[in-house]
């Protein structure tokens, strides 16, 4: 896998794409986990150290996302909160060098935020399932 970007979270009927929640098919969630985990190396004191997004860091983003999903705010407010999660991922990527996770989350949030009322709810639900599967398949460090 060389690209983590996707064009849609759902099929033409509004159902979550199966490969985003299972370990079957091309671009499945297990492949995405491996791609995110192989993000890169950090040069410290003339030694290369592998940089990993730890499960607790991933869970913090997932918990923030769940707060947005579960709150009773209007759609516009939820979109603003999702964009703040995207901004936090950008900040974390600079600190922790987790660029692939940032790209993953940014792409998925953009897909949700750019939708109208009906599609917004379907895509938000699909992203919730996709993110949940990512956390489930993500190994403990």
Image (cartoon, helix red, strand yellow):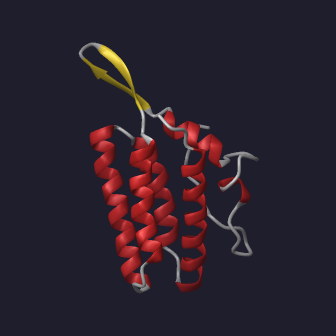
**In which quadrant will I find the N terminus?**
top right
Residue 87: quarter of image:
bottom left
Residue at left 41%, top 86%? 74
Q: Position of residue 97 (x, y in %)?
A: 34, 37
Q: Position of residue 5 (x, y in %)?
A: 55, 51
**In-image side of 95 versus 141 (left or right):** left
**Eyeballing the image, is 13 above or below 19?**
below
**In-image side of 98 versus 21 (left or right):** left
Residue 125: quarter of image:
bottom right
* Viewer-proximal residue among 139 and 68: 139
Residue at left 59%, top 84%? 118
**In-image side of 3 versus 52 (left or right):** right
Residue at left 42%, top 84%? 72
Q: Residue furthest left?
A: 45
Q: Residue furthest top?
A: 46
**Eyeballing the image, is 140 above or below 21?**
above
Q: Position of residue 102 (x, y in %)?
A: 41, 49
Residue at left 28%, top 43%? 94
* Viewer-proximal residue among 61 and 114: 61
Q: How many marks?
A: 0
* Viewer-proximal residue among 110 and 44: 44
Q: Position of residue 80 (x, y in %)?
A: 35, 74
């Amino acid at each position: 896998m060389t690209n983590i970007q996707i064009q849609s979270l759902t099929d033409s009927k509004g159902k979550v794409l199966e490969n985003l929640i299972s370990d079957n098919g091309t671009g499945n969630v297990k492949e995405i986990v491996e791609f995110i985990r192989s993000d890169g190396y950090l040069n410290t004191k003339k030694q290369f150290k592998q940089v990993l997004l730890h499960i607790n860091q991933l869970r913090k983003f997932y918990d923030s996302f769940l707060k947005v999903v579960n709150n009773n705010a209007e759609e516009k407010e939820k979109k603003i909160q999702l964009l703040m999660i995207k901004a936090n991922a950008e900040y974390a990527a600079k600190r922790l060098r987790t660029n692939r996770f940032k790209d993953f989350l940014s792409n998925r949030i953009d897909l949700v935020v750019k939708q109208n009322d009906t599609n917004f709810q379907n895509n938000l639900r699909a992203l919730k399932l996709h993110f949940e599967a990512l956390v489930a398949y993500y190994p403990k460090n």
